[in-house]
Amino acid sequence: MLHKYSRFVVACTVLLILAGSFVTSTDSGLSVPDWPTTYGQNMFTFPYSKMVGGIFYEHGHRLIASTVGVLTIGLAVWLWLAEPRRWMRWLGVAALGAIVAQGVLGGLTVLFFLPPAVSTAHAGLAEIFFCITVAIAVFTSPGWAANTGVDDATLRRLTTLTTVLVYAQILVGATMRHTGAGLAIPDFPWMFGHVVPDHWSAKIAVHFAHRVGALVVALAIVSTSVYVWRRHGDRMELTRPATLILFLVGVQVMLGAFTVLSRRDVWINSLHVVCGALVLTTSLVITLRAYRVRFRAPQQRLGVAA
Amino acid sequence: MRLRNAWVGCAVAVALAASVAACGGSKEASNTSAEPGGGAGAAAGGQKVDTATAGEVKGTVTVDGAVPKNEPIKMNADPVCVQQNKTPQFQETYMVGSDGKSLANVFVYVKDGLGNYVYDTPTEPAKIDQQNCRYHPHVFGMRVGQPLEIVNSDPTLHNIHAMPKSNQEFNNGQPIQGMKMTHTFTAKEVMVPFKCDVHGWMNAYVGVLDHPYYAVTDADGKFDIKTLPPGTYTIEAWHEKLGTTTQSVTVGQKETKEITFTFKAPAGATATN
């Protein structure tokens, strides 16, 4: 039941990330100038009829974030009361701390007129929170308890590197997004008609880094997937996410390309953010399962505790 | 409790804005510059302009070539805006006259050459109104230290978000029809953009200057900068998309100089609306 609940929190977090990306894609981040109130009103009593224009996205994001916050409190309490593994209990606390910090960052970025550093930190912490909720779902799954995993140091190194690269790429993407560099290079696949831009600015450099990062990440993911299929083709818990991530990274590259070609269409741009988060957490799932052998089985831990 | 505090805050803000309006009234954007001696409170030091010997710079701003069509606006994000605007709406980026050349909404001002003249700061507030989900005026000028009255005449929520580089950025909500607030810019800046993040199509620009020699071109592209002391000046014309262009002009005693600014239309533009 706890596992099902944690999966529900994961699903709500995906929705929250989509809502957050809509705020940026529609340039609605400052449509509600105050925080934590909404136009001077308690945010929970702000009438739906007044959620017009950009307020719909910004206030909607705040409401969904509050809901996820409440769900995370429930998750942390549930883990604290029911989870025998001590580190799991603290992982619940970490999730709660992350969502609280995330809310404060969201408020600060509004009050200080969206400084790129704070907005990028808000985006980066969102991914960390999402990773924590996914990790909790993995650690509470029946598969995690039943399986001892594979002992492959190369797989562990490869998946860790891939996950770190994906996260770094997301941070570069968030920097690009929050510095208004999304169309700094306006063409695709060329860059100002060349393989490499023929002129430079800070925004062009960030945008270029994100495109180069996409290539690096795609190579890392393909390498990880090929390695998993070659060496551990009989392990469903590895091959399934390894196949899924190939599909996701393909979709992600296309969404990135169409974000440029469509001049930042709101839906394409927002789905690019969500798909990036899914690539990250799928990579995380493979990584955690690669490390499964390093964890003791929950029942063993329970035995020690008893 | 928080709600009550908010209401008290709103009431105080409205009362304050209303008292300022009652003292100063309002002033619509004009293609003519203000009198340099207007208003109370003489500035200390420097030389006052002798209006008896002052001259004038007037003229026209035109655009050479076809400008792009103004972007259509979809207001369906807010039913109130849809109700208020029954006809198709467009951005006010290129306001070209019926002759196909004259350009409105260009801010023309003395950029350099004024020396150390001093001017009284007007107490009468400049005004920007959010009406029919648009800013009125779209381009205007005001003075450093002069109050700016910001009004929401719409029965819907607006936020007024100023994004200056030299002045303090601000973003205030005006959720109630008739709400007013005032703001004072402390440094000269050409131009300060305004936007409403609720209604993404709403934008406006204000030129904030430490002297009264500015004007905004009217529907015929005409401007008039009056009571300019004799001297040689750099006059700049600013347009929100076409950028800036400058001219040097020498004005003698009681002389009226006529000048024309011509912007080049962007390459590839085919038609206007």
Image: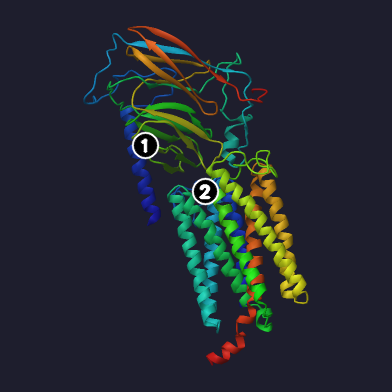
A15, above or below A138, in the image: above
Question: Split into 4 quadrants, where in the image is the N terminus of chain B?
Answer: bottom left
Q: Which amino acid type corresponds to the residue marked 1 in the rendered image? A: His
Q: Nearer the viewer, residue A209 or A26?
A: A209
Secondary structure under tag 2 reads loop
| Residue bearing mark 1 | B183
Instruction: Tell me the distance, in whole angstroms, between the alpha carbons under discs 2 and 1.
Output: 22 Å
Q: Amino acid at mark 2?
A: Gly
Which chain letter matches label 2? A
Q: Position of residue A90 (x, y in %)?
A: 50, 76
Which residue is drawn at the image coordinates 65% and 59% (left, top)?
A217
Q: Give the image location of residue A112, x and y in percent.
A: 43, 49
Image coords of residue A106 (percent x, y):
48, 56
Q: Is residue B48 left or right of residue A284?
A: left
Query: The numbered mark 1 sits on a residue in which chain?
Result: B
Identify which residue, B93 or A71, lies in the foreground: B93
Residue located at (46% from left, 40% from top) = B161
- Which dot marks residue A29? 2
Callout 2: few (<14), some (14-19), or many (20+) C-alpha neighbours within 10 Å? many
The answer to which image quadrant residue B201 occupies is top right
Q: Quadrant of residue B32?
A: top left
